Amino acid sequence: QSVLTQPPSASGTPGQRVTISCSGSSSNIGSNTVNWYQQLPGTAPKLLIYSNNQRPSGVPDRISGSKSGTSASLAISGLQSEDEADYYCAVWDDSLNGMVFGGGTKLTVL
Amino acid sequence: QVQLQESGPGLVKPSETLSLTCTVSGASISSYYWSWIRQPPGKGLEWIGCLYYSGSTNCNPSLKSRVTISVDTSKNQFSLKLSSVTAADTAVYYCARGLRLGELSFSAVPEYWGQGTLVTVSS
């Protein structure tokens, strides 16, 4: 059981906007910045968002992140078939003095 | 182009020590945070621990008693040792480099990842 809670699945049709939530506590999301990863089947995770809402070079601006209190969200607009993947949130936890990952959300493009 | 490559045995016997090495190219290991993350088959990601180039480390409390992470700056490599392994330690093991947020500001958040290596614990 992860300390960060994500819905196990999400779905949308091409062109739609989908959001994936990540719920934590005061010792992680409440006091540190949130990061998001995309993992395509059989590949290593790719950093999509860091510091709540910053995109690394090469990540399209249709992908965005936000944080409020002890929760965070990843939004993908203009959904494409290539977005079908697993998505993970990750945050430093001050109580554990280590990084924690959410359980992951499998995004299906219908 | 930063590249990381994990290497080590793909099969380890129960109760023995798992040893992996991550070879870094395109970046000096004498900066940044360097991490190990694992993913059991069909499951989510688990952070194992990280090392700052100076040698200081942080490890997952649930694994801390069994984990050693070290760096060899002369070879631009860092390593993971996980002792007393069981079947529950079977996973794809990734090494990763942390983010650079500014001139002298580094984060443990993994940015660049290796391709991963599957380690199976079985007799």
Image (spheres, helix red, strand yellow):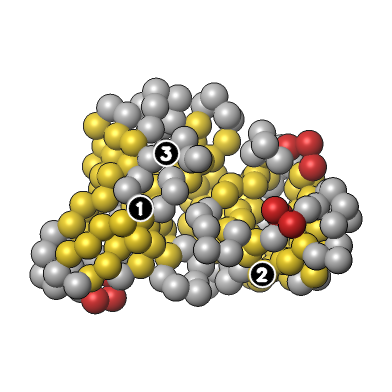
Q: Chain of mark 3?
A: A
Disc 3 is placed on an element classified as loop
Name the outermost residue toward the right.
B16
Classify A37 as above or below A91.
below
Q: Chain of mark 1?
A: A
Amino acid, disc 2: Thr
Mark 2 and mark 3: Cα distance apart in space: 26 Å
Quadrant showing the C terminus of chain B: bottom right
Corner quadrant of residue B66: top right
Q: Would you name the residue on which mark 3 appears? A: A4
Q: Residue at x 61, y 68 (%)?
A: B116
Mark 1 and mark 2: Cα distance apart in space: 25 Å
Name the spot of residue A84 as percent of width and height, x first.
Answer: 30, 70
Callouts 3 and 1 on one subunit: yes
Q: Chain of mark 2?
A: B
Q: Is residue A83 visible?
A: yes
Closest to the observer: A67 or A10?
Answer: A10
Q: Residue at x 52, y 58 (%)?
A: B43
Asked whether the beta carbons under mark 3 and mark 1 sit within 8 Å of each other, the answer is: no
Q: Residue at x 55, y 68 (%)?
A: B2
